[in-house]
Image (spheres, helix red, strand yellow):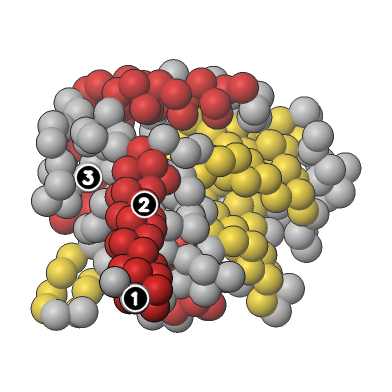
């Protein structure tokens, strides 16, 4: 065998082995075992600098074996509690519906586990598109039965350290599938904003980030999920993003015209059970110099 042919075969074997390693990592290690905490420190317009608030964000868990079984959820809850947040928010898409599900997690189980998140201001939830597309009634009632309020186009005024702020939860923006790439939402942003009755600062929870183009300056911070950061992301670029705005709203802290949004890369997998360059994450938002 010539040297060059041997080099070629060695290189080819290495490439195949490397490809298998990457595939194994993206298909098993990153989605199933990694867990990152991504922290953001900010004092956006309208949020008092001397009003510290720590929010743990749980987005897109998509519960189901093999990647998001009960033990994995317990691990995430323990990690979130270790951050000692003031408030925990769940941004929707609670169950997995992809073809690689090996075993479902009973919704009473995942709901009970998420309810074990501990924070003085409690746990607040919104619903995502997968919740609307599959088992909506059961998911909504499992959350409520576990004691987790589900916000759908409503607002609650919370008190923290003697001050008040508004937490708004938007209905899902692509709740109904009307045709190929044609959706209809149940979101009502004007109606939700109208429930704010004083000038306390406000935070909006929205499953999909696309609403951000319409969010007014009155909202200090929008928290969103849904994109999973594209599930595959290199050097700040995701080839596939389930957003009408592509990479503009794919991931991270986005500031436009003085308005702030944080898009979580989420925790689970939706259609394809693959993650590469976007490890499952708990987002920790520290507002107003919260340590
Ligand atoms: Fe989603």
Q: What whole-number distance in Å separates the C-alpha atoms at marks 3 and 2?
A: 25 Å
User: Residue 137, position in %: x, y?
Assistant: 15, 41
User: Residue 56, position in %: x, y?
Assistant: 58, 37
The quarter of the rendered structure image containing the N terminus is: bottom left
Residue in the foreground of this view, choosing between 255 and 151 = 255
Of callouts 3 and 2, the N-terminal one: 2
Q: Which residue is mark 1?
A: 2
Q: Name the residue at 11% across, 51% down.
A: 99
Disc number for residue 21: 2
Q: Which residue is mark 3?
A: 96
Q: Nearer the viewer, mark 1 or mark 3?
A: 1
Q: Is residue 279 visible?
A: yes
Q: Nearer the viewer, mark 3 or mark 2?
A: 2
The quarter of the rendered structure image containing the C terminus is: top right
**Pointer 3 local density, CA inside 10 Å: few below 14, some 14–19, many at least 20:** many
Q: Name the residue at 70% across, 79% down.
A: 257
Q: What whole-number distance in Å separates the C-alpha atoms at marks 1 and 2?
A: 28 Å
Secondary structure of residue under mark 2: helix
Q: Is residue 271 left or right of residue 201?
A: left
Q: Name the residue at 62% across, 22% down.
A: 82
């Amino acid at each position: 065998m010539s040297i060059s042919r041997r080099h070629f075969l060695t290189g080819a074997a290495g490439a195949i082995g490397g490809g298998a390693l990457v595939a194994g990592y993206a298909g098993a290690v990153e989605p199933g075992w990694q867990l990152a905490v991504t922290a953001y420190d900010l004092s956006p317009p309208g949020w008092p600098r001397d009003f510290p608030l720590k929010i743990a964000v749980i987005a897109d868990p998509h519960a189901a074996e093999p990647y998001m079984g009960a033990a994995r959820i317990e691990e995430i809850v323990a990690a979130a509690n270790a951050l000692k947040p003031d408030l925990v928010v769940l941004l929707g898409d609670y169950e997995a519906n992809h073809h690689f599900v090996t075993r479902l997690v009973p919704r009473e189980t995942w709901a009970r586990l998420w309810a074990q998140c501990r924070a003085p201001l409690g746990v607040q939830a919104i619903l995502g598109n997968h919740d609307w597309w599959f088992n909506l009634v059961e998911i909504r009632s499992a959350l409520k039965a576990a004691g987790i309020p589900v916000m759908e186009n409503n607002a609650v005024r919370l008190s923290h350290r003697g001050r008040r702020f508004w937490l708004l939860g938007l209905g899902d923006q692509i709740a109904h599938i009307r045709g190929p790439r044609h959706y209809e939402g149940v979101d009502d942003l004007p109606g939700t904003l109208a429930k704010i009755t004083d000038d306390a600062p406000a935070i909006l929870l929205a499953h999909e980030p696309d609403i951000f183009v319409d969010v007014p300056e009155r909202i200090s911070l929008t928290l969103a999920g849904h994109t999973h950061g594209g599930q595959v992301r290199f050097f700040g670029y995701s080839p596939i993003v389930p957003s009408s705005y592509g990479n503009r709203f794919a991931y991270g802290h986005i500031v436009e015209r003085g308005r702030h949004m944080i898009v979580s890369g989420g925790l689970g997998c939706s259609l394809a059970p693959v993650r590469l360059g976007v490890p499952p994450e708990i987002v920790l938002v520290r507002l107003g110099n919260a340590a």
